[in-house]
Image: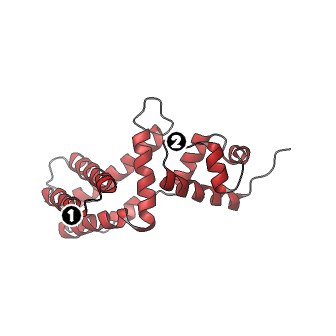
Amino acid sequence: MPRPLDHARRAELLEGVIAYIADRGLAELSLRPLAEYLGTSSRMLIHYFGTKEQMLVAALETQRPDIAALFAGIDDPEVLKSRLGQSFTLNTTGTASISIRVLLQVLGAATVPGSPFTAYATDAIEVLITAMTETLTRINPSIEDPEAAATLLISGMRGVIMDWWITGDTGRITRSVNLLVNQLF
């Protein structure tokens, strides 16, 4: 008879998986070193999650922020500009930075043909674009193509955050964020 799942332990493991990826990266992820890091065995990870890919997607799902809440109630372009400018700081420090760092790794891995992360990455991008499109439409109904504007903004922010983590050039990146945000309005 299979051993029943300990849901509290499963949640603990998922939190540990995110910390591991943030600390050591997704590219070289292997079950044995991950299991050792988590204080368990690779067999137990398979018991809890099925496959490595299923485990990673489950861990990512625990990190998904409420995107709609980030932009809810914003009806003023200046408030949106401020919120986006602040998001650079929030997404590069503290606990949010772990989620964003892991998400960026997954988005990169999803570009490989046949990636097990394609569906997750597609959904993550669609959620962001939809929320931003709705916000831009609410703020300025005269924007000719709000979905394209939202795509440019979200993709640009994602790019400058990744650039900052690679280069650490805060001054250049801050200027770039401000330029990107101000281009829309």
Tell me the SS state at disc 1: helix
Image x and y of residue 49, in percent: 66, 46
Q: Amino acid at mark 2?
A: Glu
Q: Is residue 82 above or below residue 5?
A: below
Marks 1,2: beta carbons within 8 A: no
Number of numbered markers = 2
Q: Quickly name the residue at label 1.
A: 171
User: Which residue sits at x=38%, y=51%?
Assistant: 127
Q: Quadrant of the N terminus?
A: top right
* Residue 124 in the figure: left or right of residue 156: right
Q: Is residue 111 above or below residue 100?
A: above
- The quarter holding residue 140 reads bottom left
| Picture colour scheme | secondary structure
Label 2 environment density (alpha carbons within 10 Å; few <14, some 14–19, many ≥20): few
Q: Work out how far the residue at label 1 is from the one at label 2, CA to CA, in angstroms.
A: 32 Å
Residue 62 visible (yes or no): no
Q: Amino acid at mark 1?
A: Gly
* Residue 176 in the figure: left or right of residue 46: left
- The quarter holding residue 136 reads bottom left
Image x and y of residue 112, in percent: 42, 32
- The quarter holding residue 79 reads bottom left
Residue 82 marker: none
Nearest the camera: 16 or 156? Answer: 16
Label 1 environment density (alpha carbons within 10 Å; few <14, some 14–19, many ≥20): few
Image x and y of residue 48, in percent: 69, 48
Which is more N-terminal, label 2 or label 1?
Answer: 2
